[in-house]
């Protein structure tokens, strides 16, 4: 079965490669800013579904995987920072606090669709202001939800994680692998 990842994230490509090397990438053309939901968790589910369906309509015989990840800081969605000031604001909010990371995943092939959300909880130690300044001077925070890469320098601030580490990077690997297995079995029955 042809598998298409509807994401341009290099981290998702890397993580999907832990499951299979046999896939292609085709980012969706969905206007993410036009999609709204009642909660951060509902938002990632809606965004993942929209991205998946956008690419699936162009590839009806392929299994398409769409994903979206946000950091949920007390109900506020922290997406990718717009600039250094936005990254600084996000990191200051996360400093010494707990937050949730939600990743929505949608898989579709023909009439079959599976859509789920995985949540991990992350707690950071207090981050000294000079560390925030040094971090935002790098390129690391700018293409990541919440302005941090858990697999990068943000690992220095990590107090605790509850849930799937890979979910924080943008793809809950074990859940996606299990869902792919079930999805493949279900589509073969029809």
Image (cartoon, helix red, strand yellow):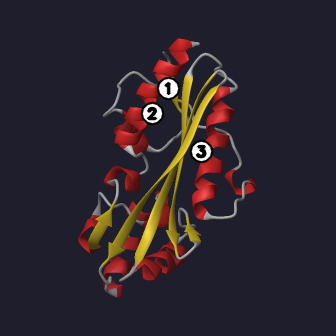
Q: Nearer the viewer, mark 3 or mark 2?
A: 2
Q: Is residue 82 left or right of residue 36?
A: left
Task: Check disc 2 and report the residue beneath it.
Answer: 179
Q: CA distance from mark 1 to mark 3?
A: 16 Å
Q: What whole-number distance in Å separates the C-alpha atoms at marks 1 and 2?
A: 6 Å
Residue visible at 34% across and 50% down in the picture: 166
Q: Is residue 139 visible?
A: no
Could you classify mark 2 by the number of other residues whose Cα lies within 10 Å: few (under 14), some (14-19), or many (20 or more)?
Answer: some
139 or 109, which lies in front?
109
Q: Is 169 above or below relative to 10?
A: below
Q: Secondary structure at mark 3?
A: helix
In the picture, the disc for residue 133 is: none
> Measuring 24% from the left and 71% from the top, which residue is drawn there?
156
Q: Which residue is mark 1?
A: 183
Judging from the image, what secondary structure is the residue with disc 2 in?
helix
The residue depicted at 41 percent of the width and 26 percent of the height is 181
Q: Name the quadrant containing residue 6.
A: top right
Mark closest to the chain's N terminus, 3 or 2: 3
Q: Position of residue 49 (x, y in %)?
A: 63, 41
**Residue 48 - label:** 3
Q: Are marks 1 and 2 in contact (CB under 8 Å)?
A: yes
């Amino acid at each position: 079965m042809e598998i298409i990842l509807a994401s341009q994230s290099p981290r998702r490509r890397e993580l999907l490669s832990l499951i299979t090397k046999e896939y292609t990438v085709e980012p969706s053309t969905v206007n993410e800013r036009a999609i709204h939901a009642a909660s951060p968790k509902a938002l990632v589910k809606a965004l993942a579904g929209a991205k998946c369906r956008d690419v699936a309509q162009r590839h009806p015989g392929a299994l398409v995987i769409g994903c979206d990840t946000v950091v949920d800081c007390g109900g506020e969605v922290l997406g990718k920072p717009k600039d250094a000031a936005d990254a600084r604001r996000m990191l200051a909010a996360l400093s010494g606090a707990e937050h949730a990371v939600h990743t929505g995943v949608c898989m579709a092939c023909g009439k079959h669709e599976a859509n789920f959300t995985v949540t991990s909880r992350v707690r950071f130690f207090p981050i000294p202001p000079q560390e925030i300044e040094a971090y935002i001077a790098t390129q690391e925070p700018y293409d990541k939800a919440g302005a941090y890469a858990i697999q990068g320098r943000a690992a220095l601030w990590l107090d605790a994680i509850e849930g799937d580490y890979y979910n924080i990077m943008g793809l809950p690997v074990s859940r996606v692998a299990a869902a792919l297995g079930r999805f493949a079995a279900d589509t073969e029955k029809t």
